[in-house]
Amino acid sequence: MRQVHRHSAAGDQTRAGVNHPAEDAEPDDSKWHEINWQPKNIPFTENPGPIGDAAALESEQPVDFAELFISDVLIQNIVDQTNLYADQCIQAMDDTSKHARCHAWKPVTVSEMKTFMGLLFLTGIIHKPELEMYWCTDDMLATPYFNKVMPRNRFEIIWRFLHFSDNTTRPDNCTDRLYKIRPVLDHLVSKFREMYQPKSNICIDEGMFLWRGRLAFRVYNPQKPIKYGVKSYILCDSDTGYCFNMKPYCGESATLGDTVVSLLDRLAGHGYRLFMDNLYNSVRLCERLLDVKTHVCGTIRKNRGEPPVIRDVRNAHLRIGETIMRHNENVMVLAWRDKQTVKMVTTFHQNNMERVEVWQRGHQEKVAKQKPACIVEYNHEMNGVDKLDQNIVYYPFIRKSHKWTKKFVMYLFQISLFNAFFIYKAKNPQGNCNTLLSFIQSVIKSWTSQECASGGEKSATENTPRAPYNTDPKNRLNVSFAVHELVPILPTPKKQHPTRGCRVCVRKGLRKETSFYCKSCGVPLHPGKCYSVYHSKANYSA
């Protein structure tokens, strides 16, 4: 759990690439008081829970909840842009060989794109260092499900041409650095807001997407486990971690105050209690949010509008456990000495202490301690974004790529699946998928079923295995016909008479194909000499 003293002003000042709001003007000390603090009472007026299409959905199938966010409309747009980008790339490749893999491209469909994304999600559960290894037929490394659902070459060529917006329609004066992912980003974030009403406690923090390549708006944040990458301002439900809104930081000049107000969106004016760390908080912003009926609590940095008695306090000025409090009738600011001096700002807490149990060095059991109420609740409610980050990092299906756009869209899909799982649990408390893992597995099965993969027809190639390309089965020298039966390669929906390169001929440098394969070895072979040579000679390529 996030602890308040981890967010010291000195530590957060090292965050790079951040536009901090301007320092507040020198406060008038006469407006700050020490007694008679009474926070404003702003009632919470919303009903938390699924809303809109999510509330109307009566289903026990996880895939239906995943498609609330990753809808057919979004997938159709990705399909259209992928096909368009593939055509543009192939037309520009005039000097490529006619045998180049790009010339095998065929337009992708919605059902095939779902299959592709299902396999991509599965790579987050089954971890392998290289993408090609998922189609490896070596007994030690094999994952047969991938071969059954989609050929490796088809998966790789879809990943190569995967695209999300039309580059040719981008205006010359366009300054949107997120243009390439804008359709996906806007669609998903709007769905985040439309499907769920958060509970009364919400929080804003930064989420980091790992990217170490060159990028104009890449940032370095030493306070995060992921220190290099694309930063996003994220607003989450403190209790569940549901991502309600997010805004990637791409070097824009907007102040953090404007960013916070834009993240609140339709939540402003309904009595929400917002928790933020000292990157965002200032006395001026607290008063601004009070005007839109939103309470604030969090740590505060120096020169953010606090009175001089709080601004200039040092460790030596306070004994451990001692506090200093001031208020201006709207905002309360206090300094409390623990191991270090912690400074807080709040608009809805009383100046009272609460008893908590904490671990201390030298004690085998927790020790009772008095802490300000605002710090106790801040420590408890400020971990909404941490819950989101923690859950999506368990099953990461973001693959290596030279294009940050593909990886960022996969990051958005991870958040979408987590949000979908939470709504599924809210609608089906006794459902079969009790964990995020089982939820993702169910979605994968729905999208990669053979009926979905072949557009309604069961694939006929599922019983035609492929042998390892670089190795031969250990029992190939057993010449028993009962073991090494030569059978025809089964037809596919696209080919009635499929053929493959004969293993013996290929090793001799000949490009000859056959319509038969050894049922035991899985190796394509010509009947007759190639069959007998392969099963009788140790060095059959001589």
Image (tube, grey):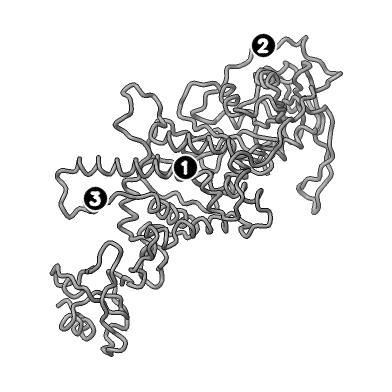
The answer to whether the residues at label 1 and label 3 have Cβ atoms under 8 Å apart is no
Q: Quarter holding the C terminus?
A: bottom left
User: How far is mark 1 from mark 2, CA to CA?
Assistant: 39 Å
Q: Residues within 10 Å of mark 1 (few under 14, many from 20)?
A: many
x and y percentages locating residue 305 in the rendered image: 67, 17
Crowding around mark 3 (Cα neighbors within 10 Å: few <14, some 14 to 19, many 20+) is: some
Q: Mark 3 highlights which residue?
A: 102
**Which comes before the other along the chain, label 1 or label 2?**
2
Q: Residue at x 67, y 41 (%)?
A: 49
Name the image quarter holding the N terminus: top right
Residue located beneath label 2 in the image: 26
Total marks in image: 3
The image position of residue 354, as x and y in percent, is 84, 37
Residue kind at label 3, given as amino acid type: Cys
Q: Are marks 1 and 2 in contact (CB under 8 Å)?
A: no
Asked if 99 appears above or below 297 in the picture, the reply is below
Q: Secondary structure at mark 2?
A: loop
**Which residue matches tag 1?**
210
Indicate which disc residue 310 carries.
none
Q: Residues within 10 Å of mark 2 (few under 14, many from 20)?
A: few
